[in-house]
Amino acid sequence: MSERSDRSHSDGSNDAIEFISINETCRLLDISRPTHWRWVKSGILPQLVELGPNKKGHLKSELREKIAKRPRHTYGVPPKAA
C-alpha cells in the first residue's frame, strides 16, 4: 500500500506527497527485488526515501519521471513525426 503525506499551505492548497513501497514498485514493473536493487544502484530507478526504521520507498513523482525518461522500443516501426 502506498504511503501519503499531505502538506497544507497558507494559501489553502494541498500538495500530496505519495510514496510507493519496494514491493509495489517490483509488482508494477514486474521485476524481482534483486533487480530493483540493481536498478536503484545503477540509476535506472530513483534513490529510496526512508519512511520509517524498517520501511523504504520511492517518491511516486520521481518514479514516474524516471520511467517516462526511459527509451521506448519501437520494434522496427519508425516513430511518428510530431
Image (tube, grey):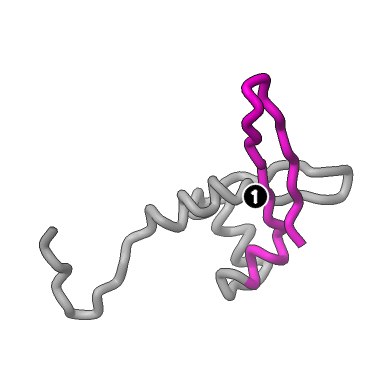
Q: Residues within 10 Å of mark 1 (few under 14, many from 20)?
A: many
Outermost residue on the left side: it is: 81
**Which picture quadrant has residue 11?**
top right
Q: Position of residue 6 (x, y in %)?
A: 73, 38
Outermost residue on the bottom side: it is: 76
- As for residue 11 lying within the magenta part, the answer is yes
Q: Is residue 77 left or right of residue 43?
A: left
Q: Amino acid at mark 1?
A: His
Q: Position of residue 5 (x, y in %)?
A: 75, 41
Q: Residue tagged by mark 1?
A: 58
Q: Position of residue 80 (x, y in %)?
A: 14, 68
For the C terminus, which image quadrant?
Answer: bottom left
Front position in the image: 7 or 73: 7
**Which picture quadrant has residue 39?**
bottom right
- As for residue 76 lying within the magenta part, the answer is no
Front position in the image: 47 or 15: 15
Q: Residue at x 38, y 53 (%)?
A: 69
When the figure is inspected, residue 49 is found, relative to residue 60, above or below; the finding is: above
When the figure is inspected, residue 35 is found, relative to residue 19, above or below; the finding is: below
For the N terminus, which image quadrant?
Answer: bottom right
Range of residues picked out in magenta:
1-27
Q: Residue at x 67, y 24 (%)?
A: 9
Outermost residue on the right side: it is: 53
Q: Residue at x 60, y 51 (%)?
A: 60
When the figure is inspected, residue 5 is found, relative to residue 32, above or below; the finding is: above
Outermost residue on the front side: it is: 12
Image mark count: 1
**Could you tell me which secondary element the residue under label 1 belongs to?**
strand
